[in-house]
Image (spheres, helix red, strand yellow):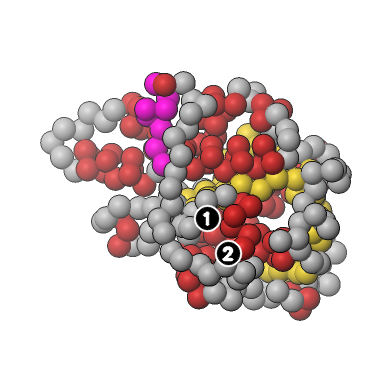
Amino acid sequence: MSESGMNNSNPVTLSAYIEGIGLLGPSFNDWPSSQLLLTGKQPYEPSKTVLPPPMLLPAPERRRSGDIIKLSLAIMLEAINAAQLDAASLPSVFTLSNGDGYNCHAINEMLASDDRQISPTRFHNSVHNAASGYCSIATGAMTPSSVLCAHDASFGAGLLEAMSQVSIDQTRCVLVAADTNYPEPMYSVRKIYDSLGIALVLAPEPSPQTLAKITLSITDAIADQLPDTTLEAIRLAIPAARGLPLLAAIAMGKPTSVVLDYLDDSRLALKVEPTESQIC
């Protein structure tokens, strides 16, 4: 993390207050326990992501839900519960670099066979906004929900969209960035090997639940890397993990700046100002 990433020639900035964080991924079981891993205070020992069953969904939808839905719902609820808010009251931004890889694989297998009668359930679970729809069913939310996809830039695109909504509409918003793995043969060309998701509850004003204030601008500086080589490999392999340097900066508990990956010719420069309570 450094101050060198800020582009002072670009005056356009967005700011928001983070009130809740959700994190699930390889060896990341939740935000509180993950802070020690992100700050290097506890050695990182790789283990596969464990996805909880989506118990808030009605039984029929629970049986049909794929990994992307389980992951999205788990991190969204962790962030909203930490912020002590009603999930039904929050607008949302979902950003995913892909849909459910296993559903897409199953559809491709059927299209390559003599039987092309694709199940409607299989189809609607494969589309890109499935996670948003299932999370709305689980929480009863009737609020606006945006769904984005920007390949490896998906976390950055989602953060920009969510912070724009917070700044322009002066309303809270929950950002859900999630990716799940691909089976072979798709894995051979898109090597996402495990599931990881980050959720942030963003607010326009500080509150007793505020963990940090973030201020965003566009920069052409190089994105920050994570000092642990295993964590850095996760950041590069799973698009949603491009947000891990931001979480590491918050976990450090002191003001700093961090540059996140976005597009090939532009990145996101973030000034991070944690509250005193956000100290490991």
- Circle number at residue 91: none
Q: Residue at x 75, y 49 (%)?
A: 18
- Circle number at residue 28: 1
Left or right: 71, with 110 as reference point? right
Residue at the bottom extreme of this rendering: 4
The stretch drawn in magenta includes residue 117: no
Q: Quadrant of the C terminus?
A: bottom right
Q: How far apart are marks 1 and 2 (CA)?
A: 8 Å
Which quarter of the picture shows residue 99? top left
| Towards the viewer: 144 or 44 | 44
Mark 1–mark 2 CB contact (< 8 Å): yes
Q: What residue type is labelled 1?
A: Phe
Percent position (x, y) of residue 264? 58, 69
The stretch drawn in magenta includes residue 67: yes
Percent position (x, y) of residue 205? 86, 44
For the record, the magenta segment spans 60-68
Dot 1 or dot 2: first in sequence order is 1
Q: In terms of secondary structure, where does tag 2 sit?
A: helix
Q: Can residue 151 be seen in this view?
A: no
Percent position (x, y) of residue 104? 33, 43
**What is the chief secondary structure element of the magenta stretch?**
helix
Q: Is residue 131 visible?
A: yes
Q: Which amino acid does label 2 sit on?
A: Leu
Q: In terms of secondary structure, where does tag 1 sit?
A: loop
Q: Which residue is drawn at 20% across and 33% down?
A: 116
Q: Which residue is drawn at 68% across and 69% down?
A: 259
- Circle number at residue 37: 2
Judge the density around disc 2: few (<14), some (14-19), many (≥20) Cα neighbours within 10 Å.
some
Left or right: 226, with 71 as reference point? right
Q: Quadrant of the N terminus?
A: bottom right
| Towards the viewer: 268 or 49 | 49
Percent position (x, y) of residue 187? 32, 58
